[in-house]
Amino acid sequence: MRELAFEGPRVRRAQIEYRDTSPASGPGPAGWALSRKAFLLEDIEVVAERLGGRALSDQEAADLNDAGFEEELVVALQLLHALLGNWDYTLSPDGTEIWNTDVIAFPDGRYLPVAGDFDLASWVTAVVRASAPWDYHPQLGEVEREARWRVEELRRSARPDVFAAASERFWSRRGALEGRVATAETDESGRANALRHVASFYDALGNTE
């Protein structure tokens, strides 16, 4: 998100060690230790404070009916979800349809949508949750089909000038994004999956059939 100039939480890598403190007299084994790679993620309240705003509660976000989100930003965020293979969200310019999207309110009355909750995204899981019709480009692989379907849906629903402006955010940063994935600290299967998503997304974005 940072590479694509979206506002979002800061992230820090961590190594977490879990230590069992169960009594030695208990029924199971005790005293074990387990170390795992992890990351620390800013909470939305921290993000909002850093940006000079206030994070809306879930109820406040659900009650929005005239958020006036910037149209180009909404389309760009929808394209971000298409890049990540994430369909577990909703986002509309007026805020009446919102799910798995945080909202920050600013003193001047502006609202900022912040994408999040990518745990079901195929970029993360390598498991594609199909949304395209069964007969849509069946010759394509799952990742490629879903990327093209979602991008085409956005191209049809957005104003041409808004879609073009939102797309430019991605075109101008393609090399930087590919470079970040290529050098990321991850296993090779995860890297290959991410690079496949990137390639499929840009193929879909450049397709004008």
Image (cartoon, rainbow, N blue to C red):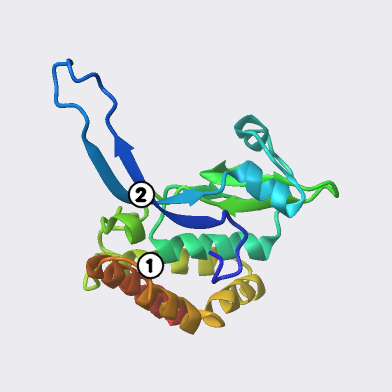
Q: Residue furthest right?
A: 108
Q: Quadrant of the C terminus?
A: bottom left
Q: Secondary structure at mark 1?
A: helix
Residue hosting label 2: 120
Residue hosting label 1: 147
Q: Secondary structure at mark 2?
A: loop
Q: Quadrant of residue 84?
A: bottom left
From the viewer's side, name the closer residue of 75 and 84.
Answer: 84
At x 25%, y 42%, the residue is 34
From the viewer's side, name the closer residue of 137 and 80.
Answer: 80
Residue 44 position in % (x across, y down) = 60, 45
**Vertical position of residue 156 compared to residue 177: above or below:** above
Give the mark count: 2
Q: Quadrant of residue 6?
A: bottom right
Horizontally, residue 55 falls left or right of residue 89, namely right
Horizontally, residue 205 falls left or right of residue 61, namely left
Residue type at mark 1: give it.
Answer: Ala
Q: Residues within 10 Å of mark 1 (few under 14, many from 20)?
A: many
Residue 158 position in % (x across, y down) = 59, 65
Q: Residues within 10 Å of mark 2 (few under 14, many from 20)?
A: some
From the viewer's side, name the closer residue of 70 and 209.
Answer: 70
